[in-house]
Image: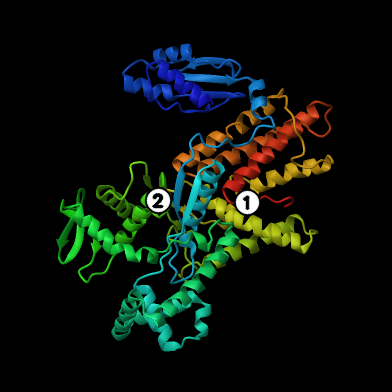
Amino acid sequence: MLGQRVSEALAEAGAQDAPPVVGPATRPEFGHYQANGVMGAAKRLGTNPRALAERVLAELDLEGIASRVEIAGPGFINIHLEPAFIAAQLDTGQPLLEPATESMTIVVDYSAPNLAKEMHVGHLRSTIIGDALVRVFTALGHHVIRQNHVGDWGTQFGMLIAHLEEIGANSEQLSDLEMFYQAAKRRFDDDQAFAQRARSQVVALQSGEPDVRAAWRRFIDISLNHCETIYQRLGVQLTRADVRAESAYNDDLQDIVAQLDDAGLLTRSDGADCVFLDQFTRKDGTPLPVIVRKSDGGYLYATTDLAAIRYRCRTLHADRVLYFVDARQSLHFQQVFAVAAKAGFVTESCELEHHPFGSILGPDGRPFRTRAGGVVKLTDLLDEARRRAERLVRAKNPDLPEAQIDAIAEAVGIGAVKYADLSKSRTTDYVFDWDQMLSFDGNTAPYLQYAHTRINSMFQRGGLVLGSLSGRMRLAEPAEHDLGALLIRFQEVVDQVARDAFPHHLCGYLADVAARFMQFYESCPVLNQDEPIRTSRLLLSQRTADVLKTGLGLLGIETVERM
């Protein structure tokens, strides 16, 4: 609301396209916000920021919203919100989130494991960041289509099928798909005759030979079962119905190349079919190709990705397509997006967005590995998280029933791993640290989960059920104003995450909410107060719990009644 009002005033003052950055001031008083879009607008207009701020102030109508509006410094506009306005926004009859003004069809490409082997720590970020954005878009009323673009095609499957053929179709080694893959890979690397047999199996697979296809489907089924178990433990909303594998586009690839040729984009280079675009060159200035068909007639990831783009834009009619794939693929997506646009695979209304992320590092600053130097399986990581969380839960509440300890440990352990990742800017690398992520202090999932349980406990002590109260609160004390002013920003923060695809903004906001609630709780007694103060503070606490639970839910993290 504030952002819209300031934007309208900026437009009236002659700065139509200025972003009205509105948020809490650096050192906020209670309900004190700052609009600093004026500074950037003034720079673009070549005018004095303070003079522009005065024009904006003359157009700004915040009657009933702000108790005082003033210009500070070189041209910041300080907005002091009315306590009654904050209280009205927090009325329990108001929904926490309003749907977007325009519903879009949004395709989200995330997780995308290679089905030839087990999911490992390298799949974590794509999976949980993508899931968080799916939840955010859904909460805002968009039509969301999940796309799990799993790797289920190519040389690695020829390798697996050849190895299975040699050791016997009923091999017990299939119970550990990762070990089976490693054994097949060693054979492929060390034995040229085996490598040739593996390549011939790929040809048989692509041509649809029944026995080879049956072996291939067996690997796919085993691997998808494993993925589903991981998704369920992570609380990730991906099912087999969301799988749109590489193989799904196999029949489209020849047509993709033909369309590129019809558009005049195809060039033959060293026997391969390539697309050269002027904006992509090597360091020495020579053209950098997008190879869509190799000299032997085989297709590449780029060809499959072009087919996927055409399908998502032309068949699914997407308005936005978001790809959560690591930063090492940035150039690949820049090229593929550019080729798709040039070829007409992308509709005018469809936005293609690659949202890259960094790596998970070990304490030594290198990619996170086991002590033996191997890849960290996701199932092992989650088991360890649960074990560590269980020790913490038993230390805090040793008398809890075993079943409750198990449930809490799973929620806290899995939540800690997810939040430790989501709370970091996705574009940066981060160091995996068990002690930090399972801490009950600071910006962690256990801290937020504990804040929620504390509110629940307060309601239980008062003989009330959390969520049962209704009405409007009265914010008389500074700590009440401070907490209330932060709670009404929930919509703004969620909208920001939907716009920019950075879940860490929501994490930081929820951590602020928890910290500010603790300050309110310490300075404003609740249960021992007379009416109407008691009910008002209970309502404020309930609204805080709603924001924490809903916000954590958008991140795919559970809350618990006790910890």
Above or below — where is 20 with respect to 345?
above
The x and y percentages for residue 163 are 40, 83
Residue at the spot of label 2:
356
- The CA span between labels 2 and 1 is 28 Å
Q: Which residue: 79% across, 27% down?
A: 533
Q: What residue type is labelled 1?
A: Ser
Q: Which amino acid does label 2 sit on?
A: Pro
Colour convention? rainbow
Between circles 2 and 1, the one closer to the viewer is 2
Front in this rendered view, residue 202 or 189: 202
Above or below — where is 147 with respect to 217?
above
Q: Which residue: 46% across, 42% down?
A: 104
Q: Which of the 4 image quarters holds residue 116?
A: bottom left
Q: Which of the 4 image quarters holds residue 217?
A: bottom left
Front in this rendered view, residue 347 or 362: 347
Q: Circle 2 — which element? A: loop
Front in this rendered view, residue 390 or 543: 543
> In the rendered image, which quarter contains the N terminus?
top right
The x and y percentages for residue 62 are 55, 17
The answer to whether one can see residue 381 in this image is no
Q: Circle 1 — which element? A: loop
Q: Which residue: 60% across, 43% down?
A: 551
The answer to whether one can see residue 555 in this image is yes
The x and y percentages for residue 249 are 36, 63
Q: How crowded is mark 1: few (under 14 residues within 10 Å), some or many (20 or more)?
A: some
Left or right? Give the position of 61 relative to 367. Answer: right
Tag 2 and tag 1, C-beta contact below 8 Å: no
Residue at the spot of label 1:
439
Front in this rendered view, residue 363 or 90: 90
